[in-house]
């Protein structure tokens, strides 16, 4: 049976730029938006069912979000490329600058999600999964799947089963499904485990976690985690984490006027020389030289 979603939605300063495309399927609705928001634009969203939002461009520098009423100043965070919002969880958004964006909204009936997840992970794990919000910036293959789904939402060419299967794959890749063996049978981390690690790292202002903290986030013993992490990424956990910290340093070098010494302190390096050595190791140049190149582009 096709599902019609019900969501409370109030927006100000957001303009739709093209006709909205939508398609109702078995227990879910896909909606594709092309819009723009002015600086100061805002929105409020509350749905009785779970939903997923996938952006097709980086909105993190332009849109803030919070789940607390009146918490935009004290508790806001950048909007990520993909967000899973559990049923009944409110979401407030605010534009810090004008921005054009496009995104796919997936409205998912809770019972439909339980039927999808429960046969594999069990009802208790499925219910726990549906209660856990997810916010990821590195969308990877999820963006490709979402693009394929937009095509079927905008102009269906295949049986509805195809679109529903795409939604199922997106759900499997995005949601924080924790019903996995303590030691992965194929010796590799799952996409859900990697998503949790990236989300946890991004939540740290300095991008630092101990290997023990990373292992706990993945739900594995520290020794086994180190082994399967290397098999999954080709890097040790600390090498991978250093790369993420250098990514943060590059972002600050481009988007802020902080000195290199200030950036080193903010990211937990012992001093500027320590950051410079690590930066050269990962990026192949010093922070100062890398910043100069970016400024002339």
Image (cartoon, rainbow, N blue to C red):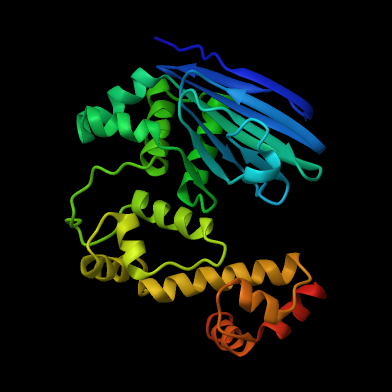
Residue at figure coordinates x 63%, y 30% from the top left: 69
Of the pair 259 and 165, the residue shown nearer to us: 259
Query: Is 80 left or right of 237, judged from the image as shown?
Result: right
Residue at figure coordinates x 54%, y 13% from the top left: 6
As drawn, 191 above or below 33: below
As drawn, 234 above or below 133: below
Q: Quadrant of residue 276?
A: bottom right
How far from the left and from the top, in percent, is residue 89?
51, 27
How far from the left and from the top, in percent, is residue 165?
37, 31
From this viewpoint, which residue is outermost toward the top? 1
Q: Quadrant of residue 98?
A: top right
Residue at figure coordinates x 52%, y 66% from the top left: 207
How far from the left and from the top, in percent, is residue 258?
75, 73
Of the pair 190 and 34, the residue shown nearer to us: 190
As drawn, 40 above or below 140: above
Query: Is 161 left or right of 269, judged from the image as shown?
Result: left
Residue at figure coordinates x 78%, y 80% from the top left: 292
Query: Is 71 left or right of 123, judged from the image as shown?
Result: right
**Total marks in image:** 0
Of the pair 56 and 153, the residue shown nearer to us: 56
Quadrant of the rendering where the N terminus is positioned: top left
Residue 164 appears in view:
yes
Q: Quadrant of residue 260?
A: bottom right
Query: Is 83 left or right of 175, judged from the image as shown?
Result: right
Residue 19 appears in view:
no
Of the pair 20 and 82, the residue shown nearer to us: 82
How far from the left and from the top, in percent, is residue 248?
60, 67
As drawn, 276 above or below 6: below
Quadrant of the rendering where the C terminus is positioned: bottom right
């Amino acid at each position: 049976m096709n599902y019609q979603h019900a969501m409370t939605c109030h927006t100000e300063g957001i303009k739709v730029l093209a006709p909205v495309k939508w398609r109702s399927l078995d227990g879910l609705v896909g909606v594709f938006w092309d819009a723009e928001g002015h600086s100061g634009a805002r929105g409020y969203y509350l749905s009785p069912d779970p939903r997923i939002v996938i952006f097709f461009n980086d909105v993190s520098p332009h849109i803030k979000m919070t789940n607390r009423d009146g918490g935009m100043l004290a508790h806001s965070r950048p909007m990520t490329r993909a967000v899973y919002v559990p049923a009944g969880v409110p979401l407030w958004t605010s534009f810090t600058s004008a921005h054009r964006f496009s995104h796919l909204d997936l409205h998912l009936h809770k019972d439909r999600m339980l039927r999808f997840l429960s046969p594999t992970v069990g009802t208790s794990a499925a219910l726990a999964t549906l209660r856990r919000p997810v916010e990821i910036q590195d969308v990877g293959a999820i963006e490709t799947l979402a693009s394929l789904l937009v095509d079927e939402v905008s102009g269906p060419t295949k049986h509805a089963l195809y679109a529903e299967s795409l939604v199922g794959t997106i759900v499997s890749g995005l949601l924080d499904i924790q019903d996995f063996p303590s030691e992965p049978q194929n010796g590799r981390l799952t996409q859900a485990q990697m998503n949790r690690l990236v989300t946890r790292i991004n939540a740290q202002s300095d991008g630092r976690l101990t290997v023990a903290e990373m292992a706990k986030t993945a739900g594995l013993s520290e020794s086994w985690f180190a082994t399967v992490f290397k098999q999954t990424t080709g890097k040790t956990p600390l090498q991978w984490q250093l790369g993420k910290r250098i990514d943060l340093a590059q972002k600050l070098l481009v988007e802020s006027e902080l000195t290199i010494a200030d950036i080193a302190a903010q990211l937990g390096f012992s001093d500027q020389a320590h950051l410079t050595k690590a930066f050269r190791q990962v990026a192949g140049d010093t922070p100062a030289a890398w910043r100069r190149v970016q400024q002339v582009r």
